[in-house]
Image (tube, grey):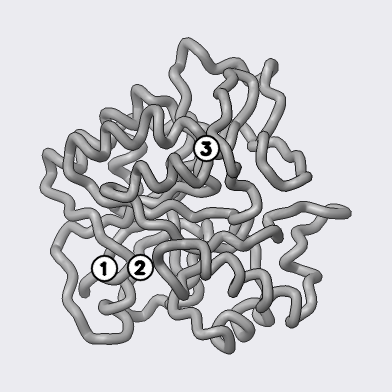
Amino acid sequence: MQNFTVLMYHELVKKVDFNYSDYQGIRVEQDYHDLLPPVLFAHLENFEQQMKYLYDEGYVTLSLKDVVDFYYNDQDLPEKSVLLTFDDMYKSVISYAYPILKRYNFHAVGFVVKDWIFNQVQFNTDNYSVCLSKEELTDMQDVFEYANHTTALHIRKDGATVLQNVDKDLFIEDVKTCDKFVSTKHVFAYPFGIYTEHNIEWLKEAGFLLAFTSEDGINTKRTDPYKLHRNGVLLDYDLEKFKDIFKS
């Protein structure tokens, strides 16, 4: 049965530079502060090995159109298909991931929180996860396409995510606003990987075709296109653990 694997990255860090005890959290345009948990970082050295492995093994990096066509237009996929995704779009994506992906002629997806993206390029700092600017997103369009991670609803509040309690009108208005900003329309990634059945109903009503969770697994034709699996590539993933993702 045809299938594809989705990989999920957030922040890349050099091993020598990473000290979580000094970490101050995210820095974004929106008036919101949060901390990325340590597992959502990936070592740059591991990432380099992982991309070389995909290249050497003949993996084909998919576009979102490929995935849409797989589910809705009966399109076949290459035998070794992988979708590379990066959430939130921090400075390490343009500093570290982008040149490596470009070297291998790989394609990737950036899931963008519209109101987190800065209007002006920001200075980077080792203690924060600093979001990219509009200009920087444009500079990477030869490698990246951008899809919807909400306009301003990537928020934790009172022990839950906003998406778990948001009303329908606000949700639809928010995702439609972000969709006007991103390059690839009608594709969504659930903030924190958490969603309700109402969220799925509202995405369908708003014309969305795909939605990505953060639940591990390989995607087949039988996978619900609104509950697509994504495998987090986490801090302690050496090459052998990375290879195991493709066996699950």
2 or 3: tag closer to the N-terminus: 3
* Distance in Å between CA atoms under marks 2 and 1: 5 Å
* Distance in Å between CA atoms under marks 3 and 1: 29 Å
- What's under tag 2, amino acid-wise? Asn
Identify the residue at horizontal 52%, vertical 39% (top origin). 132
Q: Is residue 26 left or right of residue 88?
A: right
2 or 1: tag closer to the N-terminus: 1
Instruction: Give the quarter of the image for residue 35.
Output: top right
- What's under tag 3, amino acid-wise? Tyr
Q: Is residue 212 left or right of residue 139?
A: right
Residue lying furthest bottom in this view?
A: 205
Residue indicated by mark 2: 219
Task: Pinpoint residue 116: horizontal percent, then vertical percent.
Answer: 63, 47
Residue indicated by mark 3: 90
Instruction: Give the quarter of the image for residue 75.
Output: bottom left
Identify the residue at horizontal 64%, vertical 36% (top origin). 37
Quadrant of the frame with the C terminus = bottom left
Pick the front one: 164 or 180:
180
